[in-house]
């Protein structure tokens, strides 16, 4: 409050300065990588030198809103590159484009070549423009599985896992030599759902019926010499020709500028004290682990499942949830989940803390690209669950096991000797597979945790176990399919979730949404924190996770990105 007068004077001076001159008529955005849904958490000082922060979907939406409210700006140019993006992220971006068009702004997509993902996004725009000599790549969906059992055996390594059903296939790449019938069936229904979403989007944007939209996909790829005649794109133009094209109606060259130059000429709303009631935003992103949340300092160049993933730790998430539960000004909460799951114990700790939040105020869950297994478990306290049609969710099931490396040490002529007291103290050791007795113990543990999982979901979704069982068993669904099965309540993204949270809490439509970073001091009950993981610890987290938890609620790595 002491600083508010100074903030207001600074805003007043800034508004006068911004009124001098005009912003560009069209604002240029270059999308060259998959944007996260939320801004990256603050980085340490040394990490800031490793690269610029990523532009999030939330920040891009705020920039689009500012453009929509400025009458002097006519529209936006999206320069699209072929970065791989999850289907749900593309749908987030399509919604932002749709909102901008509803505000009367012209949105033009331009790209040197369109991939499956970028063409899907471009179809949401007013115009699709391709560079000369560019092409629209073969459109459609495919996925390739890698099964390592035979290759690992050559090095004396194997995997020994117990799963609730063949559909809980997270360990299949390590335990099998080829794709199982159940996994093949699951992939088929997921790709079919995504394909239907694509056909509908193309049909709507290109003014076609579904049959002709399928023909457009099946006849791809297209070169720049046929794309206009085939109604695949609207124009073939170099980027240098865009000013003339956009200004054609006025007979003058349109001025195009980046967001930074437009922002300096745009008026901003007056500052407020911002001390009223608000919607608290929490996040669970990455593999769910026992311990603290963390991020890889530098991502590996190759995407290896579980290795180098962001980590959502129960010690961190529980503290954030307790802070939100205790904050009386936070009258509603939105939980953003983008996780394949992980440790069943960490998932349970998070769920219990979130139940406390839900008992005191409305809790709405918004699913990102993935919210499966443990990622679905933590969503069950929500009074309302929102997902994108392309979200991958479900995978209600658990599995457990270990990587067996005893044969590797024998091949290397390394002699390992163990002295143990206790019949089963070495049960999770990596020297040898489970004995039949140990396997029975693991099976009982897996079945027990699975029954608990089913009970939690059935109670949250107001189903019977008999109704839930056919859609559980570790089966994965798209958001659209999950809505049909009653696992989610509404299609949408963060804005949809925030709107629902405001409505449940009786807040006005413009009530702010603020992310909660967590308390500076621990909120009891206290828990001892493990030592911080270094660079190697981040990389090994995925491998150690497989061996150290008696049961995992982790979802298989399924098609989630489009290039």
Image (cartoon, rainbow, N blue to C red):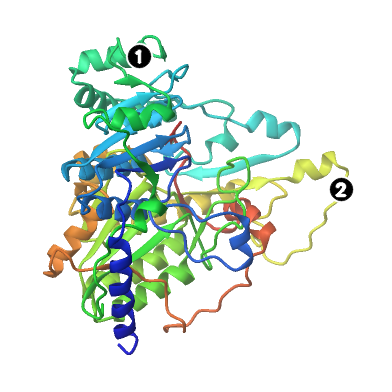
Q: Left or right: 417 with respect to 325? A: right
SS class, disc 2: loop
Q: State which quarter of the image contains the N terminus.
A: bottom left
Q: Left or right: 116 with respect to 539? A: left
Few, some or many residues within 10 Å of mark 2 (<14, 14–19, 20+): few
Residue 365 in the image: above or below residue 77: below
How many labels were placed on the picture? 2
Asked which quadrant contains residue 344, the reply is bottom left
Q: Give me the residue at 33% from left, 29% from top.
A: 244
Q: Earlier in the sequence, mark 1 or mark 2?
A: 1
Asked which quadrant contains residue 278, the reply is bottom left
Measure the alpha-carbon separation of dots 1 and 2.
62 Å
Give the residue number, with chain letter if any, for mark 2: 414
**Residue 30, position in %: x, y?**
43, 41
Q: Is residue 137 visible?
A: no
Asked which quadrant contains residue 202, the reply is top left
Give the residue number, with chain letter if any, for mark 1: 227
Residues 189 and 434: in front is 189
Q: Is residue 310 visible?
A: yes
**Residue 435, position in %: x, y?**
63, 47
Q: Give me the residue at 59% from left, 56% from top.
A: 296
Q: Left or right: 362 with respect to 184? A: left
Residues 123 and 258: in front is 258
Q: Give me the residue at 55% from left, 79% from top.
A: 528
The mark found on residue 91 in the picture is: none
**Residue 482, position in %: x, y?**
26, 41
**Residue 324, position in %: x, y?**
32, 75
Residue 53 in the image: above or below residue 88: below
Few, some or many residues within 10 Å of mark 1 (<14, 14–19, 20+): many
In front: label 1 or label 2: 1
């Amino acid at each position: 409050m002491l600083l508010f007068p100074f903030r207001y004077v600074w805003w007043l001076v800034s508004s006068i300065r911004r009124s001098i001159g005009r912003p560009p008529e069209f604002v240029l955005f270059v999308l060259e990588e998959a944007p996260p849904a939320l801004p990256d958490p603050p980085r340490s000082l040394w990490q800031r030198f490793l690269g610029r922060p990523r532009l999030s979907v939330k920040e891009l939406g705020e920039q689009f809103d500012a453009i929509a409210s400025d009458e002097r700006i006519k529209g936006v140019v999206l320069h699209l590159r072929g970065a791989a993006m999850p289907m749900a992220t593309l749908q987030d971006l399509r919604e932002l484009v749709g909102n901008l068009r509803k505000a009367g702004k012209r949105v033009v997509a331009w790209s040197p070549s369109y991939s499956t993902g970028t063409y899907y996004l471009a179809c949401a725009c007013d115009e699709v423009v391709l560079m000369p000599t560019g092409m629209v790549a073969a459109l459609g969906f495919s996925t390739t599985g890698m099964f390592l059992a035979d290759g690992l055996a050559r090095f004396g390594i194997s995997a020994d896992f117990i799963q609730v059903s063949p559909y809980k296939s997270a360990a299949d790449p390590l335990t099998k030599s080829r794709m199982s019938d159940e996994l093949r069936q699951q992939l088929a229904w997921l790709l079919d759902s995504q394909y239907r979403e694509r056909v509908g989007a193309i049909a709507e944007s290109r003014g076609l019926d579904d049959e002709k939209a399928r023909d457009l996909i099946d006849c791809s790829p297209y070169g720049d010499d046929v794309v206009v005649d085939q109604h695949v794109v609207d124009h073939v133009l170099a980027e240098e020709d865009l000013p003339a094209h956009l200004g054609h109606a006025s007979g003058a060259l349109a001025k195009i500028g980046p967001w930074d130059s437009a922002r300096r000429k745009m008026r901003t709303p007056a500052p407020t004290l911002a001390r009223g009631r608000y919607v608290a935003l929490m996040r669970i992103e990455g593999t769910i682990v026992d311990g603290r949340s963390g991020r890889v300092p530098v991502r590996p160049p190759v995407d290896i499942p579980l290795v180098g993933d962001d980590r959502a730790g129960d010690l961190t998430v529980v503290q954030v949830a307790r802070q939100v539960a205790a904050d009386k000004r936070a009258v509603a909460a939105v939980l953003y989940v983008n996780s394949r799951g992980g440790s069943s114990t960490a998932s349970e700790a998070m769920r219990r803390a979130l139940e406390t939040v839900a008992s005191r105020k409305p809790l709405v869950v918004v699913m990102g690209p993935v919210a499966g297994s443990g990622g679905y478990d933590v969503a069950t306290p929500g009074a309302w669950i929102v997902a994108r049609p392309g979200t991958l969710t479900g995978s209600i099931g658990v599995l457990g096991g270990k990587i067996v490396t005893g044969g590797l040490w024998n091949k290397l002529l390394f002699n390992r000797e163990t002295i143990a007291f206790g019949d089963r103290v070495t049960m999770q050791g990596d020297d040898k597979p489970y004995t039949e007795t140990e396997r029975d113990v693991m099976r009982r543990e897996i079945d027990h945790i699975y029954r608990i999982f089913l009970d939690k979901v059935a109670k949250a979704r107001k189903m019977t176990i008999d109704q839930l069982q056919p859609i559980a068993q570790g089966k994965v669904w798209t958001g659209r399919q999950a809505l049909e099965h009653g696992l989610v309540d509404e299609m949408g993204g963060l804005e949809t979730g925030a709107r629902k949270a405001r409505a449940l809490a009786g807040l006005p439509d413009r009530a702010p949404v603020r992310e909660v970073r967590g308390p500076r001091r621990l909120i009891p009950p206290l828990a001892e924190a493990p030592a911080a993981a270094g660079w190697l610890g981040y990389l090994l987290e995925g491998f150690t996770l497989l061996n150290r938890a008696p049961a995992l609620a982790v979802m298989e790595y399924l098609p989630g990105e489009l290039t």
